[in-house]
Image (cartoon, rainbow, N blue to C red):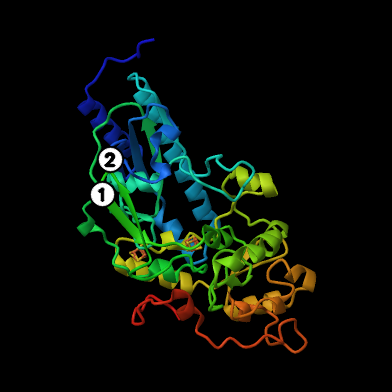
Amino acid sequence: MPPPTKPISQEELTAKVREFPVIYGASIVGITSVETLAGGPPTTDLSYVLEGARSAVTFAVPTDADKTRDYLGKVDRAGHQQDYTKTSIIADGIAAQLASFIRQFGHETTAVMQNLVFRNDKPGDLNHRTPDISHRYLAVRGGVGWFGFSGNVLTPDHGPNVILVSVVTAAELIPTDPLPPEDNYCDDCQACNTACPSGFFRHGKKNKVTVTMGGVDFTYTERRSYDRCSYVCSGCTGLHSSGQWSTWSPARFPIPKEDEHLLPIYKKVAFKAWSERPELPGGGMQSPITFSKTKRDVTLTCGNCMHVCHPDKKERERRVKLLQEGGVIIQQEDGSLQSVSAEEARAHVAAMDPEQRALYEPADPESYDPKLYFGVKNHSQYGREGGGATSLPSETEDLDAARFGNVKQDDPMIDR
Ligand code: SF4
Ligand code: SF4
């Protein structure tokens, strides 16, 4: 059946798809093609989502900066959660509209949702999460943003505080160039690393990952196990190893220094406690995988590496300060959250009966060797007469220095 529209030229269709998302709220748009993505990772294979695909349109829709700041400062979690969800739905909606628009010019087209859609290439393995298409890779190749140190996509106006989404089409669109690398505002400031309680990012000149797409190289820092981010970002734990600030998670399970020790504490201990704690108020993201395992939604508690990063360096510093001076989250019995001082938070957990306390920190702290785990000294019973952790050796090393490895020692953004 012929399309309901009059044919238009490749140039006209390309100009229209670049303009379309911006009209509805996107801040920047890029186009990639099978040729400009050639040689990229498997998640740049457009044919995985559409047979005969030739091009993709990727765009960024910014989230609300005020809500991000209130979230970082632990003033308001729900406001950012709702904004993040609403912005994601707007991004998905623009993608669906754009896909319909292109289809009516006679080209098979599909929208790829911004998140929570994964390949079924290891059926039954719920921890194996490869997205259908990587919006990140398409974004940097098409000129939506640059990779920062963190590997997040930094857009020129909003940094990584955007929702990325793509539309894949059989139409032959004219691809756009990557942004000039010399304009990348990432100056290796380490705010993202400082803001990450999980120690997800490696730092060092050799710890880099390079991805080549269409003959162009893109580099960011090597990441450790994705379960490391997931452990913190999912809310299973959230207290920074300094004990002075936290994410929005009220839990304080220790964080293994080596990835090999991660899964036992994450999956067998902290995840179980997470699924038995009262749910965080304010709603969450609708993740089919998480719901299938726990009958719960995914509530945002971290994302700090994105939130502290901003094109304006002074603003980055302000955001790190908000995070570090925003206190420690505790949870009341009715599930409500409160930000209090480090000392009050510790006293709050210490006052719980052992069964309730086990929902927030290990019931058997002596099982966690401070040489192998960050944050053991933050256990509410640490050093107490008759407490479960009195036999623990004291932690003499500088935890942050150990975690951040060879980070520049004179960098004021790194807290120690
Ligand atoms: S926070 Fe700093 S180091 Fe991290 S990506 Fe942003 S600019 Fe780069
Ligand atoms: S989301 Fe949180 S835990 Fe995950 S890498 Fe970013 S800062 Fe680290």
Q: Looking at the image, can residue 344 be seen?
A: no
- Position of 118 compared to 95: left or right? right
Per the model, the C-alpha gap separating discs 2 and 1 is 9 Å
- Dot 2: element: loop
Q: Position of residue 404 (x, y in %)?
A: 44, 75
> From what the image shows, is residue 341 above or below residue 142?
below
Looking at the rendered structure, the kind of residue marked 2 is: Thr
Decide: few, some or many residues near mark 2? Use Cα within 10 Å; few <14, some 14-19, many ≥20: many
Q: Disc 2 or 1, which lies upstream in sequence?
A: 2
Q: Can you say which quadrant of the picture contains the C terminus?
A: bottom left
Q: Position of residue 374 (x, y in %)?
A: 57, 76
Q: Residue at x 70, y 61 (%)?
A: 268
The residue wearing badge 1 is 216
Q: Residue at x 58, y 86 (%)?
A: 395
Disc 1, ligand 1: is the CB inside 8 Å? no
The answer to which image quadrant residue 66 occupies is: bottom left
Q: Position of residue 75 (x, y in %)?
A: 52, 64
From the viewer's side, name the closer residue of 414 and 228. 228
- Would you say the residues marked 2 and 1 are in contact, meaning their CB atoms lie under 8 Å apart? yes
From the viewer's side, name the closer residue of 312 and 41. 41
Q: Can you say which quadrant of the picture contains the N terminus?
A: top left
Looking at the rendered structure, the kind of residue marked 1 is: Val
- Position of 359 compared to 187: left or right? right
The answer to which image quadrant residue 156 occupies is: bottom left
- Position of 93 compared to 217: left or right? right
- Dot 1: element: strand
The residue wearing badge 2 is 36
Q: Residue at x 66, y 60 (%)?
A: 267
